[in-house]
Image (cartoon, coloured by chain):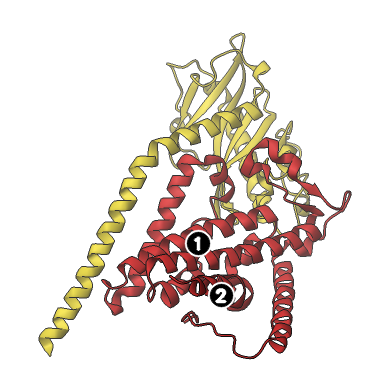
Chain colours: A red, B yellow
Amino acid sequence: MTRQIFKDIFFNGLWKQNTGVVQLLGMCPILAVSNSVVNAVSLGLATTVVMALSGAAVALIRNVVPNEARIPVFILIIAVLVTVIQLAMNAQMHGLYLVLGIFIPLIVTNCIVLARIEAFASKNPATQSALDGIAMGMGLTAVLAVLGGIRELFGHGTLLSGIDLVFGETAKSLVITVLPGYHGFLLAILPPGAFVVLGLLIALKNWLSLRTENKLPAGTPITLSSHPA
Amino acid sequence: MRRSLLNATLQTALNLLVFTIVGTTLLATTYSQTRQTIARSEQTEKLKLIGQIMPSNLYDNDILKDTLSIAPDALLGTAVATNAYRARLHDQPTGLIVEAIAPDGYSGKINLIIAIHYDGTIGGVRVVEHKETPGLGDYIEAAKSDWIKGFDGKALDSSATQAWQVKKDGGQFDYMAGATITPRAMVKAVRKALEFFSEHRQELFVPSGAAAKSSQER
Protein backbone atom coordinates (compact mmCIF):
# COMPACT_ATOMS: atom_id res chain seq x y z
CA MET A 1 0.00 0.00 0.00
CA THR A 2 1.48 3.30 -1.02
CA ARG A 3 1.69 6.42 1.05
CA GLN A 4 -0.69 8.17 -1.33
CA ILE A 5 -3.50 5.64 -0.76
CA PHE A 6 -2.97 5.93 2.97
CA LYS A 7 -3.18 9.72 2.78
CA ASP A 8 -6.24 9.60 0.55
CA ILE A 9 -8.08 7.28 2.92
CA PHE A 10 -7.53 9.57 5.88
CA PHE A 11 -8.18 12.78 3.93
CA ASN A 12 -11.48 11.24 2.78
CA GLY A 13 -12.52 10.02 6.20
CA LEU A 14 -11.58 13.08 8.20
CA TRP A 15 -12.49 15.84 5.77
CA LYS A 16 -13.57 15.31 2.16
CA GLN A 17 -16.15 12.54 2.78
CA ASN A 18 -16.69 13.23 6.48
CA THR A 19 -19.67 11.14 7.60
CA GLY A 20 -21.00 13.76 9.98
CA VAL A 21 -20.92 16.94 7.90
CA VAL A 22 -20.58 15.76 4.26
CA GLN A 23 -22.19 12.36 3.78
CA LEU A 24 -24.79 13.08 6.47
CA LEU A 25 -25.22 9.39 7.15
CA GLY A 26 -26.13 7.96 10.52
CA MET A 27 -27.85 11.12 11.65
CA CYS A 28 -29.98 9.38 14.30
CA PRO A 29 -27.17 8.48 16.73
CA ILE A 30 -25.30 11.69 15.91
CA LEU A 31 -28.24 13.83 16.95
CA ALA A 32 -29.37 11.66 19.85
CA VAL A 33 -26.07 11.15 21.61
CA SER A 34 -24.23 14.42 21.03
CA ASN A 35 -25.57 16.16 24.14
CA SER A 36 -22.27 15.92 25.98
CA VAL A 37 -18.65 15.44 24.99
CA VAL A 38 -18.23 12.19 26.91
CA ASN A 39 -21.35 10.55 25.44
CA ALA A 40 -20.49 11.73 21.93
CA VAL A 41 -16.86 10.64 21.93
CA SER A 42 -17.66 7.30 23.56
CA LEU A 43 -20.19 6.38 20.90
CA GLY A 44 -17.89 7.71 18.18
CA LEU A 45 -15.07 5.44 19.34
CA ALA A 46 -17.37 2.41 19.63
CA THR A 47 -18.59 3.06 16.08
CA THR A 48 -14.98 3.36 14.89
CA VAL A 49 -14.13 -0.06 16.30
CA VAL A 50 -17.18 -1.63 14.66
CA MET A 51 -16.41 0.04 11.31
CA ALA A 52 -12.78 -1.07 11.29
CA LEU A 53 -13.60 -4.67 12.21
CA SER A 54 -16.58 -5.05 9.91
CA GLY A 55 -14.66 -3.41 7.06
CA ALA A 56 -11.83 -5.91 7.44
CA ALA A 57 -14.23 -8.85 7.79
CA VAL A 58 -16.21 -7.94 4.70
CA ALA A 59 -13.08 -7.27 2.66
CA LEU A 60 -11.84 -10.76 3.49
CA ILE A 61 -15.00 -12.53 2.34
CA ARG A 62 -15.91 -10.15 -0.49
CA ASN A 63 -14.99 -12.59 -3.24
CA VAL A 64 -16.93 -15.48 -1.73
CA VAL A 65 -20.31 -13.80 -1.38
CA PRO A 66 -22.62 -13.80 -4.44
CA ASN A 67 -23.72 -10.33 -5.45
CA GLU A 68 -27.42 -10.98 -4.71
CA ALA A 69 -26.78 -12.12 -1.17
CA ARG A 70 -24.27 -9.46 -0.18
CA ILE A 71 -26.52 -7.05 1.75
CA PRO A 72 -27.94 -9.69 4.13
CA VAL A 73 -24.46 -11.12 4.64
CA PHE A 74 -23.00 -7.65 5.37
CA ILE A 75 -25.79 -6.87 7.84
CA LEU A 76 -25.29 -10.25 9.48
CA ILE A 77 -21.58 -9.57 9.90
CA ILE A 78 -22.18 -6.12 11.38
CA ALA A 79 -24.87 -7.39 13.74
CA VAL A 80 -22.75 -10.30 14.95
CA LEU A 81 -19.73 -8.04 15.51
CA VAL A 82 -21.76 -5.46 17.42
CA THR A 83 -23.40 -8.10 19.61
CA VAL A 84 -20.06 -9.76 20.35
CA ILE A 85 -18.58 -6.37 21.30
CA GLN A 86 -21.61 -5.61 23.44
CA LEU A 87 -21.36 -8.91 25.32
CA ALA A 88 -17.60 -8.60 25.75
CA MET A 89 -17.95 -5.05 27.04
CA ASN A 90 -20.69 -6.07 29.45
CA ALA A 91 -18.45 -8.80 30.84
CA GLN A 92 -15.06 -7.05 30.87
CA MET A 93 -15.86 -3.33 31.25
CA HIS A 94 -19.12 -3.28 33.14
CA GLY A 95 -18.78 0.34 34.24
CA LEU A 96 -18.38 1.64 30.71
CA TYR A 97 -21.11 -0.68 29.51
CA LEU A 98 -23.56 0.87 31.96
CA VAL A 99 -22.88 4.28 30.37
CA LEU A 100 -22.84 3.23 26.72
CA GLY A 101 -24.96 0.09 26.91
CA ILE A 102 -28.05 1.38 25.22
CA PHE A 103 -26.13 3.10 22.41
CA ILE A 104 -24.14 0.07 21.33
CA PRO A 105 -26.99 -1.84 19.61
CA LEU A 106 -27.79 1.40 17.74
CA ILE A 107 -24.53 1.02 15.82
CA VAL A 108 -26.05 -1.86 13.82
CA THR A 109 -28.69 0.45 12.44
CA ASN A 110 -26.19 3.21 11.73
CA CYS A 111 -26.28 3.33 7.95
CA ILE A 112 -22.76 4.76 7.77
CA VAL A 113 -21.38 1.34 8.68
CA LEU A 114 -23.24 -0.41 5.87
CA ALA A 115 -22.55 2.45 3.47
CA ARG A 116 -18.77 2.23 3.91
CA ILE A 117 -18.86 -1.55 3.59
CA GLU A 118 -20.88 -1.37 0.40
CA ALA A 119 -18.90 1.52 -1.09
CA PHE A 120 -15.40 0.61 0.05
CA ALA A 121 -14.80 -2.66 1.86
CA SER A 122 -16.59 -4.77 -0.76
CA LYS A 123 -14.15 -3.49 -3.40
CA ASN A 124 -10.84 -3.14 -1.55
CA PRO A 125 -8.37 -5.33 0.37
CA ALA A 126 -8.69 -5.90 4.11
CA THR A 127 -5.98 -3.51 5.34
CA GLN A 128 -7.30 -0.59 3.35
CA SER A 129 -10.86 -1.40 4.42
CA ALA A 130 -9.92 -1.48 8.09
CA LEU A 131 -8.07 1.82 7.69
CA ASP A 132 -11.05 3.31 5.89
CA GLY A 133 -13.26 2.25 8.79
CA ILE A 134 -10.87 3.86 11.26
CA ALA A 135 -10.61 7.06 9.22
CA MET A 136 -14.36 7.36 8.73
CA GLY A 137 -14.92 6.59 12.39
CA MET A 138 -12.41 9.20 13.46
CA GLY A 139 -14.08 11.77 11.23
CA LEU A 140 -17.38 10.91 12.85
CA THR A 141 -15.87 11.06 16.33
CA ALA A 142 -14.37 14.48 15.62
CA VAL A 143 -17.72 15.89 14.47
CA LEU A 144 -19.46 14.27 17.45
CA ALA A 145 -16.89 15.76 19.84
CA VAL A 146 -17.34 19.29 18.48
CA LEU A 147 -21.12 18.92 18.38
CA GLY A 148 -21.22 17.48 21.90
CA GLY A 149 -18.86 20.17 23.17
CA ILE A 150 -20.93 23.04 21.78
CA ARG A 151 -24.22 21.58 23.00
CA GLU A 152 -22.88 20.78 26.46
CA LEU A 153 -21.30 24.22 26.78
CA PHE A 154 -24.50 26.03 25.85
CA GLY A 155 -26.80 23.56 27.58
CA HIS A 156 -25.02 23.05 30.89
CA GLY A 157 -22.07 25.43 30.91
CA THR A 158 -19.68 22.52 31.43
CA LEU A 159 -17.33 20.31 29.41
CA LEU A 160 -16.53 16.63 29.96
CA SER A 161 -19.26 16.13 32.57
CA GLY A 162 -19.89 12.45 33.20
CA ILE A 163 -16.29 11.50 32.53
CA ASP A 164 -16.22 9.84 35.96
CA LEU A 165 -18.68 7.26 34.56
CA VAL A 166 -15.97 6.15 32.14
CA PHE A 167 -12.76 6.52 34.17
CA GLY A 168 -14.06 6.19 37.74
CA GLU A 169 -14.56 8.64 40.60
CA THR A 170 -11.03 10.07 40.42
CA ALA A 171 -11.73 11.52 36.98
CA LYS A 172 -14.38 13.82 38.43
CA SER A 173 -11.79 16.57 38.74
CA LEU A 174 -11.45 16.60 34.94
CA VAL A 175 -14.90 18.11 34.53
CA ILE A 176 -14.50 21.71 33.39
CA THR A 177 -17.11 24.17 34.55
CA VAL A 178 -16.71 26.90 31.96
CA LEU A 179 -19.57 29.07 33.12
CA PRO A 180 -20.12 28.73 36.90
CA GLY A 181 -23.69 29.38 38.00
CA TYR A 182 -24.97 29.04 34.43
CA HIS A 183 -28.61 28.00 34.42
CA GLY A 184 -28.53 26.08 31.20
CA PHE A 185 -30.11 26.57 27.81
CA LEU A 186 -32.51 23.66 27.35
CA LEU A 187 -32.78 23.99 23.55
CA ALA A 188 -29.11 23.09 23.15
CA ILE A 189 -29.67 19.78 24.97
CA LEU A 190 -32.94 18.91 23.22
CA PRO A 191 -32.94 17.43 19.68
CA PRO A 192 -33.63 20.77 17.92
CA GLY A 193 -30.37 22.08 19.35
CA ALA A 194 -28.57 19.19 17.69
CA PHE A 195 -30.07 20.11 14.30
CA VAL A 196 -29.16 23.79 14.68
CA VAL A 197 -25.57 23.16 15.74
CA LEU A 198 -25.05 20.48 13.08
CA GLY A 199 -26.39 22.88 10.45
CA LEU A 200 -23.88 25.50 11.56
CA LEU A 201 -21.05 22.94 11.42
CA ILE A 202 -22.02 21.89 7.88
CA ALA A 203 -22.07 25.54 6.82
CA LEU A 204 -18.63 26.07 8.33
CA LYS A 205 -17.24 22.98 6.56
CA ASN A 206 -18.68 24.10 3.21
CA TRP A 207 -17.31 27.59 3.65
CA LEU A 208 -13.82 26.30 4.47
CA SER A 209 -13.92 23.86 1.53
CA LEU A 210 -14.97 26.54 -0.91
CA ARG A 211 -12.21 28.84 0.29
CA THR A 212 -9.48 26.19 -0.13
CA GLU A 213 -10.83 25.13 -3.52
CA ASN A 214 -10.54 28.68 -4.81
CA LYS A 215 -6.93 28.89 -3.68
CA LEU A 216 -5.68 25.48 -4.85
CA PRO A 217 -5.30 24.57 -8.50
CA ALA A 218 -8.41 22.73 -9.59
CA GLY A 219 -8.53 18.96 -9.62
CA THR A 220 -6.43 17.77 -6.70
CA PRO A 221 -6.82 14.07 -7.43
CA ILE A 222 -8.69 11.79 -5.06
CA THR A 223 -8.41 8.42 -6.68
CA LEU A 224 -10.26 5.95 -4.46
CA SER A 225 -13.77 4.88 -5.31
CA SER A 226 -15.45 6.04 -2.20
CA HIS A 227 -18.67 7.77 -3.17
CA PRO A 228 -21.58 6.53 -1.10
CA ALA A 229 -24.26 4.51 -2.77
CA MET B 1 -31.09 -21.92 -18.61
CA ARG B 2 -33.48 -23.27 -16.07
CA ARG B 3 -30.82 -25.39 -14.54
CA SER B 4 -28.35 -22.53 -14.13
CA LEU B 5 -30.98 -20.37 -12.45
CA LEU B 6 -31.70 -23.15 -9.99
CA ASN B 7 -28.00 -23.58 -9.43
CA ALA B 8 -27.44 -19.91 -8.76
CA THR B 9 -30.37 -19.80 -6.33
CA LEU B 10 -29.14 -22.83 -4.46
CA GLN B 11 -25.64 -21.45 -4.29
CA THR B 12 -26.86 -18.13 -2.90
CA ALA B 13 -29.03 -19.88 -0.34
CA LEU B 14 -26.19 -22.16 0.68
CA ASN B 15 -23.90 -19.18 1.03
CA LEU B 16 -26.38 -17.38 3.26
CA LEU B 17 -26.85 -20.52 5.32
CA VAL B 18 -23.12 -20.90 5.90
CA PHE B 19 -22.79 -17.29 7.04
CA THR B 20 -25.81 -17.62 9.31
CA ILE B 21 -24.39 -20.74 10.93
CA VAL B 22 -20.96 -19.16 11.41
CA GLY B 23 -22.57 -16.02 12.86
CA THR B 24 -24.84 -17.97 15.18
CA THR B 25 -21.94 -20.10 16.40
CA LEU B 26 -19.88 -17.00 17.11
CA LEU B 27 -22.74 -15.40 19.03
CA ALA B 28 -23.55 -18.55 20.99
CA THR B 29 -19.89 -19.02 21.95
CA THR B 30 -19.50 -15.41 23.09
CA TYR B 31 -22.76 -15.61 25.02
CA SER B 32 -21.82 -18.77 26.90
CA GLN B 33 -18.31 -17.41 27.55
CA THR B 34 -19.55 -14.13 29.01
CA ARG B 35 -22.82 -15.17 30.63
CA GLN B 36 -21.44 -15.95 34.07
CA THR B 37 -19.24 -12.88 34.27
CA ILE B 38 -22.15 -10.71 33.23
CA ALA B 39 -24.47 -12.28 35.80
CA ARG B 40 -21.82 -11.78 38.47
CA SER B 41 -21.22 -8.12 37.67
CA GLU B 42 -24.97 -7.50 37.63
CA GLN B 43 -25.22 -9.09 41.07
CA THR B 44 -22.36 -6.93 42.38
CA GLU B 45 -24.02 -3.88 40.91
CA LYS B 46 -27.27 -4.75 42.68
CA LEU B 47 -25.50 -5.15 46.03
CA LYS B 48 -23.84 -1.77 45.58
CA LEU B 49 -27.26 -0.24 44.94
CA ILE B 50 -28.68 -1.84 48.08
CA GLY B 51 -25.93 -0.20 50.11
CA GLN B 52 -27.01 3.20 48.78
CA ILE B 53 -30.66 2.95 49.83
CA MET B 54 -30.47 0.92 53.06
CA PRO B 55 -27.80 2.34 55.38
CA SER B 56 -26.03 -0.36 57.35
CA ASN B 57 -26.99 1.11 60.75
CA LEU B 58 -30.59 0.11 60.07
CA TYR B 59 -29.93 -3.61 60.17
CA ASP B 60 -27.70 -6.11 61.91
CA ASN B 61 -28.84 -9.25 60.11
CA ASP B 62 -27.21 -10.78 57.04
CA ILE B 63 -29.43 -8.90 54.63
CA LEU B 64 -28.29 -10.79 51.54
CA LYS B 65 -29.25 -14.12 53.09
CA ASP B 66 -32.54 -12.99 54.61
CA THR B 67 -34.44 -13.06 51.35
CA LEU B 68 -38.02 -13.70 50.48
CA SER B 69 -39.23 -14.86 47.11
CA ILE B 70 -42.16 -12.74 46.00
CA ALA B 71 -44.44 -14.22 43.38
CA PRO B 72 -45.26 -12.10 40.31
CA ASP B 73 -47.53 -9.29 41.42
CA ALA B 74 -49.53 -6.71 39.53
CA LEU B 75 -48.73 -3.97 42.05
CA LEU B 76 -45.00 -4.56 41.64
CA GLY B 77 -45.34 -4.96 37.90
CA THR B 78 -43.23 -8.12 38.01
CA ALA B 79 -43.72 -11.01 35.62
CA VAL B 80 -41.42 -13.49 37.36
CA ALA B 81 -40.72 -14.23 41.01
CA THR B 82 -38.27 -11.70 42.50
CA ASN B 83 -36.12 -11.67 45.60
CA ALA B 84 -36.82 -9.21 48.38
CA TYR B 85 -34.18 -8.48 51.02
CA ARG B 86 -35.31 -8.03 54.61
CA ALA B 87 -33.56 -5.76 57.06
CA ARG B 88 -33.82 -6.43 60.80
CA LEU B 89 -32.31 -4.76 63.84
CA HIS B 90 -32.23 -6.77 67.08
CA ASP B 91 -34.63 -9.21 65.39
CA GLN B 92 -37.17 -6.45 64.85
CA PRO B 93 -38.05 -5.83 61.17
CA THR B 94 -36.77 -2.43 60.02
CA GLY B 95 -37.21 -2.47 56.30
CA LEU B 96 -37.57 -4.28 53.01
CA ILE B 97 -35.89 -3.97 49.64
CA VAL B 98 -38.11 -5.00 46.76
CA GLU B 99 -37.73 -5.03 43.02
CA ALA B 100 -40.45 -3.30 41.03
CA ILE B 101 -41.01 -2.58 37.37
CA ALA B 102 -42.54 0.55 35.91
CA PRO B 103 -44.11 -0.90 32.75
CA ASP B 104 -44.98 2.40 31.08
CA GLY B 105 -41.69 4.26 30.67
CA TYR B 106 -41.15 6.23 27.48
CA SER B 107 -39.19 3.35 25.93
CA GLY B 108 -40.50 0.34 27.81
CA LYS B 109 -39.88 -1.06 31.23
CA ILE B 110 -37.91 0.67 33.95
CA ASN B 111 -36.52 -1.77 36.55
CA LEU B 112 -36.31 -0.37 40.06
CA ILE B 113 -35.26 -1.43 43.49
CA ILE B 114 -37.05 0.27 46.34
CA ALA B 115 -36.14 0.31 50.03
CA ILE B 116 -39.18 0.71 52.25
CA HIS B 117 -38.80 1.26 56.00
CA TYR B 118 -41.02 -0.78 58.29
CA ASP B 119 -43.20 2.28 58.99
CA GLY B 120 -43.98 2.60 55.28
CA THR B 121 -41.67 5.50 54.37
CA ILE B 122 -39.36 5.24 51.40
CA GLY B 123 -35.72 4.66 52.27
CA GLY B 124 -34.62 5.21 48.71
CA VAL B 125 -35.25 4.25 45.11
CA ARG B 126 -32.71 3.35 42.44
CA VAL B 127 -33.04 2.50 38.77
CA VAL B 128 -31.42 -0.81 37.92
CA GLU B 129 -32.13 -0.84 34.21
CA HIS B 130 -33.96 1.42 31.78
CA LYS B 131 -34.10 2.38 28.12
CA GLU B 132 -35.20 6.01 28.46
CA THR B 133 -33.86 8.61 26.04
CA PRO B 134 -30.18 9.38 26.76
CA GLY B 135 -29.72 12.96 27.89
CA LEU B 136 -33.45 13.48 28.26
CA GLY B 137 -35.23 10.83 30.30
CA ASP B 138 -32.14 9.42 31.96
CA TYR B 139 -32.12 11.93 34.83
CA ILE B 140 -33.84 9.15 36.81
CA GLU B 141 -30.38 7.62 37.26
CA ALA B 142 -28.81 8.64 40.55
CA ALA B 143 -25.51 9.09 38.69
CA LYS B 144 -27.01 11.70 36.37
CA SER B 145 -29.10 13.79 38.77
CA ASP B 146 -30.52 13.96 42.27
CA TRP B 147 -34.09 13.67 41.03
CA ILE B 148 -34.53 10.14 42.37
CA LYS B 149 -33.70 11.31 45.90
CA GLY B 150 -37.04 13.14 45.83
CA PHE B 151 -38.64 9.86 46.86
CA ASP B 152 -36.62 9.62 50.10
CA GLY B 153 -38.79 9.82 53.22
CA LYS B 154 -42.07 9.97 51.29
CA ALA B 155 -44.94 7.73 52.40
CA LEU B 156 -48.42 6.86 51.25
CA ASP B 157 -50.88 9.33 52.72
CA SER B 158 -54.45 8.14 52.34
CA SER B 159 -55.76 11.69 52.59
CA ALA B 160 -53.73 12.92 49.63
CA THR B 161 -53.39 10.43 46.79
CA GLN B 162 -53.14 13.53 44.62
CA ALA B 163 -49.65 14.10 46.00
CA TRP B 164 -48.31 10.94 44.33
CA GLN B 165 -48.02 12.55 40.94
CA VAL B 166 -45.56 14.79 39.15
CA LYS B 167 -45.97 18.53 39.68
CA LYS B 168 -47.36 18.98 36.18
CA ASP B 169 -50.34 16.80 37.20
CA GLY B 170 -50.76 18.56 40.54
CA GLY B 171 -48.56 16.31 42.65
CA GLN B 172 -45.38 16.80 44.67
CA PHE B 173 -42.71 15.30 42.40
CA ASP B 174 -40.43 17.33 40.16
CA TYR B 175 -40.01 16.56 36.48
CA MET B 176 -37.94 17.95 33.66
CA ALA B 177 -39.55 19.65 30.70
CA GLY B 178 -39.55 17.45 27.64
CA ALA B 179 -39.51 14.23 29.67
CA THR B 180 -42.65 13.84 31.78
CA ILE B 181 -43.62 10.31 30.79
CA THR B 182 -40.58 8.84 32.51
CA PRO B 183 -41.14 10.40 35.98
CA ARG B 184 -44.89 9.72 35.72
CA ALA B 185 -44.17 6.01 35.24
CA MET B 186 -41.66 6.07 38.10
CA VAL B 187 -43.99 7.80 40.57
CA LYS B 188 -46.79 5.40 39.73
CA ALA B 189 -44.56 2.35 40.16
CA VAL B 190 -43.22 3.54 43.53
CA ARG B 191 -46.73 4.36 44.76
CA LYS B 192 -47.96 0.89 43.79
CA ALA B 193 -44.99 -0.73 45.51
CA LEU B 194 -45.93 1.12 48.69
CA GLU B 195 -49.49 -0.12 48.34
CA PHE B 196 -48.14 -3.65 47.96
CA PHE B 197 -46.04 -3.16 51.10
CA SER B 198 -48.90 -1.87 53.23
CA GLU B 199 -51.19 -4.70 52.08
CA HIS B 200 -48.67 -7.42 52.86
CA ARG B 201 -46.52 -5.95 55.61
CA GLN B 202 -47.15 -8.71 58.17
CA GLU B 203 -46.54 -11.66 55.81
CA LEU B 204 -43.43 -10.06 54.35
CA PHE B 205 -41.47 -10.28 57.57
CA VAL B 206 -42.34 -13.86 58.53
CA PRO B 207 -38.93 -15.40 59.34
CA SER B 208 -37.40 -17.34 56.49
CA GLY B 209 -38.41 -20.96 56.35
CA ALA B 210 -42.06 -20.11 56.86
CA ALA B 211 -41.81 -17.70 53.94
CA ALA B 212 -45.10 -16.27 52.79
CA LYS B 213 -46.03 -16.30 49.15
CA SER B 214 -47.70 -12.97 49.11
CA SER B 215 -49.96 -12.68 46.12
CA GLN B 216 -50.92 -16.30 45.69
CA GLU B 217 -53.20 -15.97 48.69
CA ARG B 218 -55.14 -13.12 47.26
Q: What residue type is labelled 2?
A: Asn
Question: Which of labels 1 and 2 is toward the front?
Answer: 2
Percent x, y for residue A51? 47, 63
Q: Which residue is drawn at 44% across and 57% down?
A: A82
Q: Name the residue under label 1.
A: A107
Q: Residue furthest top?
A: B90
Q: Residue B169: image x %, image y %?
A: 75, 53
Please, which chain is the residue tagged with disc 1 on?
A: A
Q: Which of B112 and B28 is in front in this view?
A: B28
Label 1 sits on what residue type?
A: Ile
Checking the image for residue A8, the label placed there is: none
Residue B94 vertical position relative to residue A219 in the rendered view, above or below:
above
Q: Which residue lies furthest to the right in this view?
A: A181
Q: Can residue B133 be seen in this view?
A: no
Q: Mark 2 points at which residue?
A: A12
Query: Compared to A10, does A90 lie above or below?
Result: above
Q: Residue B101, image x and y in percent?
A: 55, 43
Q: Helix or strand or loop: what does disc 2 sit on?
A: helix
Mark 1 and mark 2: span between their CA atoms?
A: 21 Å
Q: Residue A141: horizontal and vertical position, in percent?
A: 61, 62
Q: In which quarter of the image is residue B117?
A: top right
* First reached walking from the N terminus: tag 1 or tag 2: 2
**Mark 2 surroundings within 10 Å by alpha-carbon count, few (fewer than 14), some (14 through 19), many (20 or more):** many
Does residue A141 appear left or right of residue A47 in this picture? right
Residue at image position (64%, 25%) is B54
Relative to residue A37, is residue B127 drawn left or right?
A: left
Classify mark 1: helix, strand or loop.
Answer: helix
Position above or below: B144 against B54: below
Q: Is A80 placed left or right of B176 in the picture?
A: left
